[in-house]
Amino acid sequence: MSLDVADQIEKRTCITGIGQSEIGRRLYRNPLELTLDACIAAIKDAGLTTKDIDGISSYPGMAPTPAGFSGAHVTEVHDALRLEVGWFGSGIETSGQLGSVINACLAVGAGLANHVLCFRSVWEASAQGDKGRKAAMPGAGHAGEYRASGIMEWTLPFYAPSAAIWIAMFAQRHFHQYGTTREQLAQIALNARRNAALNPAAIYREPMSMDDYFAARIISTPFCLYDCDVPADGATAVIVSRRERATDLRKPLIRVEAVGTALRGRPSWDQFDDLSTMANRDAGAHLWTRTELKPSDVDVAEIYDGFSFLTLSWLEALGFCEVGEGGPFLEGGTRIARDGELPLNTNGGQLSGGRLHGYGFLHEACTQLWHEGGERQIPKPPQVAVAAAGGGNTCGCMLLVRE
């Protein structure tokens, strides 16, 4: 292994603990309470105490809109747990939702902290209440209550405030350019539901057939209801630790082998140079420049499915299949099944497990690597996992190895 690859800064770090709060639809619990449940669980899982935590990181930070998108921010958790930290940070302008974890790796690798508490919490289901998803969308109020800015200046006048509409156009382009079909795309949702049936924390666990999928209402062509993630309430936390300070903790270390953060194209939802792909193209390619491992070494993939097409796009971006071949790769669903060549979204993802953003995928990757998946644990004990999150104009990914 060349010195420059062997000495990448993220390799000095590992994940030592994970935690989640109660997860559900419309829990109507205080979002800070949910956040603290997850944080305390992660600290305990690592065999640490709050006195050991000297760093804190979160996504998206103080984000009052859309409603429920941020359950707590760094300052609240910092104060509630009475932490004494050498480094902290948060924000929405980063490499997807996993950018906050990657930032923690950089801080630990640079010596600013030894154990960083990273968290992400949402309460979108409760924020929507019984008014449906549009209640939490920009522009949902009466005229004059919302002043559009940024991309919304151009989308809101056409009643297109939702990423479901924007990403559907990426999918349509992929369908047109490569012959991808809805039957192929459906395999992502069907696989998620099969896995969710084995996850007691999943939102939707009832069986779903191809007929059920096609019977669902169209949201934005080619997406039907089951191509869209499920708003939920819940929080997830992970501990990023310095490797030499974690060798005597209670679990085998999960080394951060590589991260992917690059963005070569324009940081735009609709002005990217190739509208059959998006920012994950660059983040995925970047990941493999920082390791000697290859896509064929990955035992389990936990890949963002805010909408089903994002997962297909990530499969191509991460090199599990060639660009344009995501549809045939998914055909029949056998490759991505728990006993297939690339087990995918083993907890049900966001399509059936619940929308916990990128942290949910990282949590599940660690769960599988620690062989703690219970009924949903994949048959082959995994050693290498990839977690990827984001779509559109911000994306990031992490390659993890169990030591």
Image (cartoon, helix red, strand yellow):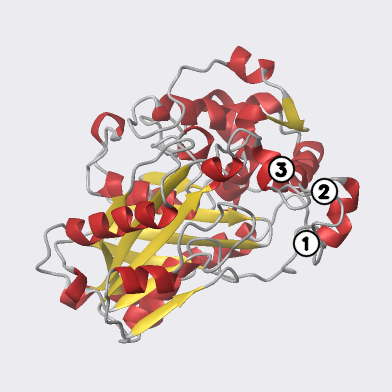
For the residues carrying marks 3 and 2, which lies nearer the camera in this image?
2
Residue at 21%, 70% in the rendered image:
50
Residue receiving disc 2: 142
Q: Position of residue 79 (x, y in %)?
A: 34, 74
Which residue type does callout 1 highlight? Phe
Q: Secondary structure at mark 3?
A: helix
Label 2 neighbourhood size at 10 Å, few (<14), some (14-19), many (20+)? few
First in sequence, mark 3 or 2: give its number.
Answer: 2
Residue receiving disc 3: 164
Compared across the picture, whether 27 is left or right of 210 comes to left
Residue receiving disc 1: 272
First in sequence, mark 2 or 1: give its number.
Answer: 2
User: Is 65 in front, or is 360?
Assistant: 65
Disc 1 versus disc 3: distance between alpha carbons?
A: 17 Å
Compared across the picture, whether 241 is left or right of 175 comes to left
Q: Quadrant of residue 24?
A: top left
Placement of the C terminus among the 4 image quadrants = bottom left
